């Protein structure tokens, strides 16, 4: 809380003392320079691909999350290095879609999953498809890297903190003119008559996805099915009109494999990754809860879901494709920075955990965002200023302001023609809504470029300013996934063994020489 912040300045003095000496900066820069000079692109084929998607994670969000992570660990924050900050290759992604200057999560997901820019609201379809017009679906399908990786014999997985039928994961397996057709109950009857299929059905029928972890139980079960976690809630019941249980459909799809379905943290923890081939975990009826409000006894975190997914998928000798999404976006739409930035910190921890569980020599890891938000922090704040704190000078209206602000959204609250005086509220609260310049019930996406961070085989393909749909092509090329067949070479035989082998042979040769000379 706020009391903890008064020890900050004392701690800061010691921390920043060394920064007054030019030697500190020169030594740090020299180390960075040496590392840059040693950097060599890995020009061989990637066995595995992990695509991390921070939904709504613009550059301003990353910078603020970096400071938050450092302050959570008791430092001033700005000098903190996030896991994604350590990735050697960096590019910018242009996020506009075919019909929108400022894009949504559906068209952007189609770009980075399927390699084609699309129209807003549509998933897994080219821009020939028209939102909500069912008959424009057929013949306009585009296929994701996940879909093509599965066809190549790789294992594939999806991890998200939102519902698994949400726009970002949906473009990996579904083709829909509406991102909101989660279950058949969401599809207008005319579209159903024309043959349009809901996203939940496509999740279990289009591609055999080995690991699926997130929310979205209610779209999978027949109308009226009580939710296992909230059995008395009427708003959380199953809502399928076709009376199908899609959890059963997924479970039975691969009889020869060991498949498990879990909906509770305890069952999730008990999964034996060695004996489990396929795992479906649906932890909430709709989206999973914000990290700030997550019930740790009932739901796993993004870090834990990422770890379990990698452990199961990595058993395939042909490798895997894993998509991991954290919905940073929803906190921003609510105009509540603490919800968004806490998600972003957890997302980075998932990136860190994945780095520990994988090898840079065989796994291409890409971290990016689908779009930004109109979120900013500024105000001439001093070093180590609490990220959710106030700027030190009052504004021209003689009232204080927080360093974090939104350009638009629900945080626009004016009283008698002037903005609210926030001295009277706890702006460190979990649900404090930062002030906004323009009133909207939901804050909007931002239109500026977002970053792409990459490491591993062929990561150097991510450099400069690129169109967002390039991401899918660079990943497919790196792992030799169609349409790319003229690919990077396989890595040379793993060096660890050759060293020991040549060492043994040398040893043996000298022994023989000693014995028989």
Image (cartoon, rainbow, N blue to C red):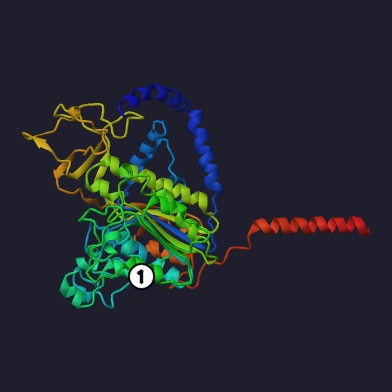
Quarter of the picture holding the C terminus: bottom right
Q: Residue furthest left?
A: 416
Q: Is residue 117 left or right of residue 255?
A: left
Q: Secondary structure at mark 1?
A: helix
Q: Quadrant of residue 125?
A: bottom left
Q: Nearer the viewer, residue 79 or 232?
A: 232
Q: Is residue 332 left or right of residue 34?
A: left
Would you name the residue on which mark 1 appears? 249
Q: Is residue 96 left or right of residue 470?
A: left
Q: Nearer the viewer, residue 313 or 325?
A: 313
Number of dots carrying numbers: 1
Q: Residue at x 53, y 67 (%)?
A: 318
Image position of 513 with respect to 425: above or below: below
Image position of 349 with respect to 204: above or below: above
Give x and y (percent) for residue 232.
Answer: 23, 53
Q: Residue at x 87, y 59 (%)?
A: 512
Q: Residues within 10 Å of mark 1 (few under 14, many from 20)?
A: some
Q: Residue furthest right?
A: 517
Q: Is residue 248 visible?
A: yes
Q: Nearer the viewer, residue 342 or 403?
A: 342
Q: Quadrant of residue 185?
A: bottom left
Q: Is residue 211 left or right of residue 166?
A: right
Give x and y (percent) for residue 394.
Answer: 20, 27
Q: Nearer the viewer, residue 235 or 360?
A: 235
Quarter of the picture holding the N terminus: top left
Q: Residue furthest front?
A: 232
Give x and y (percent) for residue 71.
Answer: 38, 33
Image position of 80 with respect to 45: above or below: above
Q: Is residue 373 visible?
A: no
């Amino acid at each position: 809380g706020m009391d903890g912040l008064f020890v900050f300045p004392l701690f800061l003095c010691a921390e920043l003392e060394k920064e007054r000496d030019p030697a500190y900066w020169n030594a740090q820069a020299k180390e960075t320079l040496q590392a840059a000079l040693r950097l060599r692109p890995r020009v061989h084929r990637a066995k595995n691909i992990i695509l991390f998607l921070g939904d709504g994670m613009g550059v301003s969000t990353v910078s603020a999350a970096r400071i938050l992570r450092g302050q959570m660990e008791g430092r001033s924050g700005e000098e903190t290095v996030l896991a994604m900050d350590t990735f050697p290759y960096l590019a910018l992604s242009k996020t506009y879609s075919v019909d929108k200057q400022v894009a949504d999560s559906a068209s952007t997901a189609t770009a980075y999953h399927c390699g084609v820019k699309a129209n807003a609201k549509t998933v897994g379809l080219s821009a020939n498809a028209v939102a909500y017009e069912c008959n424009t679906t057929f013949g306009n399908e585009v296929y994701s890297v996940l879909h093509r990786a599965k066809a190549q014999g790789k294992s594939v997985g999806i991890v998200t903190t939102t519902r698994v039928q949400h726009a970002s994961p949906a473009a990996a397996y579904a083709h829909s003119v509406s991102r909101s057709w989660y279950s058949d109950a969401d599809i207008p009857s005319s579209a159903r008559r024309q043959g349009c299929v809901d996203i939940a059905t496509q999740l279990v029928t289009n591609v055999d996805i080995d690991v699926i972890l997130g929310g979205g139980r209610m779209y999978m079960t027949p109308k009226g099915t009580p939710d296992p976690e909230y059995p008395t809630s009427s708003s959380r019941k199953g809502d399928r009109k076709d009376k199908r249980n899609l959890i059963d459909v997924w479970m039975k799809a691969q009889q020869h494999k060991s498949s498990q379905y879990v909906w509770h943290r305890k069952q999730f923890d008990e999964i034996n990754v060695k004996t489990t081939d396929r795992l479906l975990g649906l932890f909430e009826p709709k989206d999973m809860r914000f990290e700030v409000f997550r019930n740790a006894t009932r739901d796993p975190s993004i870090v834990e879901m990422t770890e379990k997914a990698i452990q199961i998928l990595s058993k395939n000798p042909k490798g895997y494709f894993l998509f991991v999404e954290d919905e940073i976006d929803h906190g921003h739409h609510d105009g509540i920075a603490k919800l968004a930035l806490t998600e972003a910190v957890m997302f980075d921890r998932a990136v860190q955990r994945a780095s520990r569980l994988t090898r840079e020599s065989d796994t291409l890891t890409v971290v990016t965002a689908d779009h930004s938000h109109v979120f900013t922090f500024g105000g001439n704040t001093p070093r180590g200023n609490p990220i959710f704190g106030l700027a030190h000078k009052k504004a021209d209206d003689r009232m204080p302001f927080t360093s974090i602000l939104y350009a638009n959204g629900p945080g626009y609250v004016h009283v008698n023609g002037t903005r609210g005086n926030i001295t009277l509220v706890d702006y460190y609260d979990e649900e404090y809504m930062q002030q906004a310049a323009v009133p909207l019930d939901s804050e909007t996406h931002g239109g500026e470029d977002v970053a792409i961070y990459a490491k591993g085989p062929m990561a150097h393909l991510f450099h400069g300013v690129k169109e967002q749909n390039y991401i899918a092509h660079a990943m497919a090329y790196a792992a030799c996934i169609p349409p790319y067949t003229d690919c990077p070479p396989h890595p040379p035989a793993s060096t660890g063994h050759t060293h020991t082998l040549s060492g043994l042979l040398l040893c043996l040769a000298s022994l023989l020489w000693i014995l028989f000379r």
